[in-house]
Amino acid sequence: MQAAYDLFCMGKKLLNEKKPTQAARLLERAKELEPGKGSILEALGRAYFSYGETKLAKKQFEEALVIDPTNAYAQYCLGICLEKMGELNLARGHLRLAAAMEPDNKLYLDKLMRFEEQREDER
């Protein structure tokens, strides 16, 4: 039986190689072994999102935030999922939280700015 950490590392490697379906399989096994690990949940959420399973991704990011509400990246990713699902007010809140938690993070700030501009254009 492989250790959760080994599965996690192999899953992250597959994610970096743009193989999210294969990564998800390994990360699901890692999650079974270590269900309370935010890093595994975050990576699994990324894998699901990468192959279009937004609802499954959303669930992983929500679980990661239960474990660590200060996880700015999980806040950001949850915001992206919610945006894709049309939950724009909730998405805005999570994107703002991520940007507030890490105000120097260009990724979060740029996404929030684009999101806010898009919302203004829709009005």
Image (cartoon, helix red, strand yellow):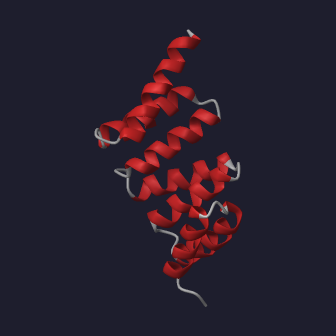
User: Residue 122 lies in what quarter of the image?
Assistant: top right
Q: How many marks?
A: 0
> Would residue 61 be found to the left or right of residue 105 on screen?
right
Of the pair 29 and 19, the residue shown nearer to us: 19
Of the pair 119 and 16, the residue shown nearer to us: 16
Of the pair 50 and 70, the residue shown nearer to us: 50
x%, y% of residue 40?
Answer: 51, 66
Quarter of the N terminus within the rendering:
bottom right
Q: Who's the residue at 53% across and 85% down the image? A: 3
Q: Residue furthest top?
A: 123
Q: Who's the residue at 30% across and 42% down the image? A: 101
User: Residue 68 lies in what quarter of the image?
Assistant: bottom left
x%, y% of residue 27?
Answer: 60, 70
> Would residue 69 be found to the left or right of residue 10 on screen?
left
Q: Who's the residue at 66% across and 47% down the image? A: 55
15 shown above or below 62: below
Quarter of the C terminus within the rendering:
top right
x%, y% of residue 18?
Answer: 64, 60
Q: Who's the residue at 58% across and 87% down the image? A: 2
x%, y% of residue 46?
Answer: 57, 55
Q: Residue furthest front?
A: 17
61 shown above or below 14: above
